[in-house]
Image: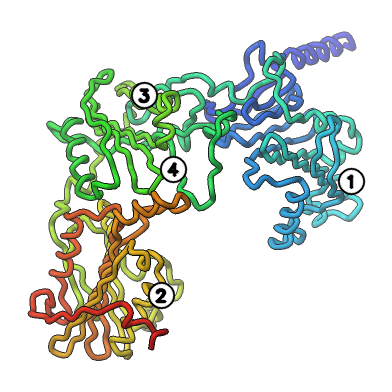
Amino acid sequence: MKRFFSFIVSVILIIGLINPVVYAVDDDGKIDLYEVFSSKEDKMKNEVGSRIYKWSMHLPDDAVIYKSERANFFDMSTNSYQASVELEVNKNKDELTLEEMLYKIQNESIRENYWDWGDKEFVVDIVKDNLGQRYIRTIKANKVYDRFMVDEAAEELGEYIENRIYIANNYIYDLTISMDGEFYRQHEEMFDKLASSFKLSFEENNPYIKELSDSVSTTREYKNKSYGWKLVMSPYWKVEGTPNSRYQKFRPVYSDEELDVDSKIEEDSEDELKISEGITVSLISSAEAGENASKWAQEEIQLFKDNYNSDVYDIIKSEARKQGNIDTYHVVIKYKTVTKKPYIVHNLYAVGNGYKYLVSAIMTEEQYKDDKKRNSFENMVNSFELDKECLSKYLGKIITAKSIINLNDLKELKMKKYNFKTKVTKSWNTFNDRDYFYDDFYYNKYEDSAYRGDISNDEHISVFEPTSNMSLDMSAGLDTNEINEIVKERVEKFIEDDEIRMGLAQVKIKSAKYNGANLYYIEKEYNLDAINNFVNEDETKVYDLEKLKNEYEYIIKIGKDTYIQSIMLPVANSTSKNKLKVNNIWENTFVNEVNYSKVNLQWKEHNLKEFDKERK
């Protein structure tokens, strides 16, 4: 019996020893950044690290590496060490020293009351590791154990946590190693082995080191198995979000600055425009009979021209192309909507499988001018193909609202309490006062007819047109101030406006009277030529022409009530067609059944200085 028992124990030990020694968690069968270490070579590796971020450390035999969409984040656990490791690497944009970093951390801790809710800190110091590298060392414990254990037990059984912050290679490395408290007190040498193995370097020729970017360093085919398409992903690109989505996004794993460390790239400023670079593949809708890519693309190009000022874009390419098993149409547009910060959008229109597909790549102009970087985007766009084998059996008809609505038809906007209305086309989205929030006090009680809600003498309507980015606000309400005082309050912002002072924008003000009604028209329009000249002369100035908006406002004062209609049109979208829309809205506006655009008003021009309170 003893011999049999010894045999069983021996078998169990042998099985345990021949199991794979290194593995990685993969919960959905898809690896985007990290791979399962299944090859013979990977089983022999005892270090892990990043060539891009220049770090490495010991890889225990039973390490579990968790997937992450963030290339600068590393998360590992190991049962044999009863420990977990987390590392986050970020650019040292402010060029902080360790001392300045500590000062910043402690100030933020005070402001956010960290010492009230955060971990218990036992040691905070700046020391050197065994390689002579300085770092901020913080030893702490999780407070949660103090809540249900007595003092001694909490310290003995709680987690032992060491946080290290290094600054090197123009990066900030935030390393946290956590170990079971009881295990730590019995095996301190194991904690030291793990912590001291961390190095701010990566040995590329070391055959025993696992590079975290291995799985994304080559081209890979991606198939969307729900919506029937495929493409070839470029090296160092990843799928963003949920795979097999209707709107599937792809993003570079690393930034240009990280991949081209020798290139001189300007540091991004917090207030500068960040281009959302990447590629999106979208199934737009089902295709109608006779619909093709060229026809669809030409309609989109015309819609674009109608809604974007010709000075804020260049159409670089517009061509039909056979691509794999489908006819496609490629349109490449250079957007100049941000002065001195142009970017490129490459759209591919495809019709097939009974559906309409749009592939859209967005890149900076610098990336577009660089052949290698442009190819990483365009190779993916040009590899796009349809694959019927990848169509979900559940995929059916997908309609768009504009296919069943004539967006050029008019609809009426009118207030409930006030006789104030206009007409816009059905392409505008409407919002009312209650669209943006839930009022917990707004209710009806049928049993006693009790009612509680917002009581107001004001009313407001807002509409927005997505194609032109134009917004319309209409308000009416009680206001006993004289019309001149109301106008003064509304134009006060223009008095100190720097763009108006420099001639980058002009303000027009005029007034009229009709049958007891007082009317004012206020217009602020930017001069795009003047803006471009100004930014060309001053390198420090930049404007986002989609956020810079022309304003057109009518104020009508009748008795104690004031009616205001305001239209905002981005400078980038200022076209003759959109200016016509502005005029049409006013020509369809009625106040107390009077259309003031149709009556003979004697307008009087005003100078902005008339409303300067300081001059009075």
Give the residue type at disc 3.
Lys
SS category of the residue bearing label 4: loop
Give the residue type at disc 1.
Glu
Q: Earlier in the sequence, mark 1 or mark 3?
A: 1
User: Relative to the observer, which residue lies in front, 407 or 530?
Assistant: 530
Residue 96 can be seen, yes or no:
yes
Q: Residue at x 78, y 40 (%)?
A: 178
Q: Earlier in the sequence, mark 4 or mark 3?
A: 3
Q: Quadrant of the C terminus?
A: bottom left
User: Is residue 169 positioned above or below 453 on the image?
Assistant: above
User: Is residue 51 positioned above or below 166 on the image?
Assistant: above
Q: Are marks 1 and 2 in contact (CB under 8 Å)?
A: no
Q: How many marks?
A: 4
Check disc 4 and report the residue beneath it: 275
Give the image location of residue 75, x and y in percent: 67, 35
- Separation (CA) of disc 1 from disc 4: 50 Å
| Front label number (2 vs 3) | 3
- Separation (CA) of disc 1 from disc 3: 55 Å
Q: Residue at x 63, y 40 (%)?
A: 90
Q: Residues within 10 Å of mark 4 (few under 14, many from 20)?
A: few
Q: Quadrant of residue 509?
A: bottom left
Q: Earlier in the sequence, mark 1 or mark 2?
A: 1
Q: Is residue 37 left or right of residue 471?
A: right
Check disc 3 and report the residue beneath it: 230
| Front label number (2 vs 4) | 4
- Separation (CA) of disc 2 from disc 4: 42 Å
Check disc 1 and report the residue beneath it: 156
| Front label number (1 vs 4) | 4
Check disc 2 and report the residue beneath it: 442
Q: Earlier in the sequence, mark 1 or mark 4?
A: 1
Q: Are marks 4 and 3 in contact (CB under 8 Å)?
A: no
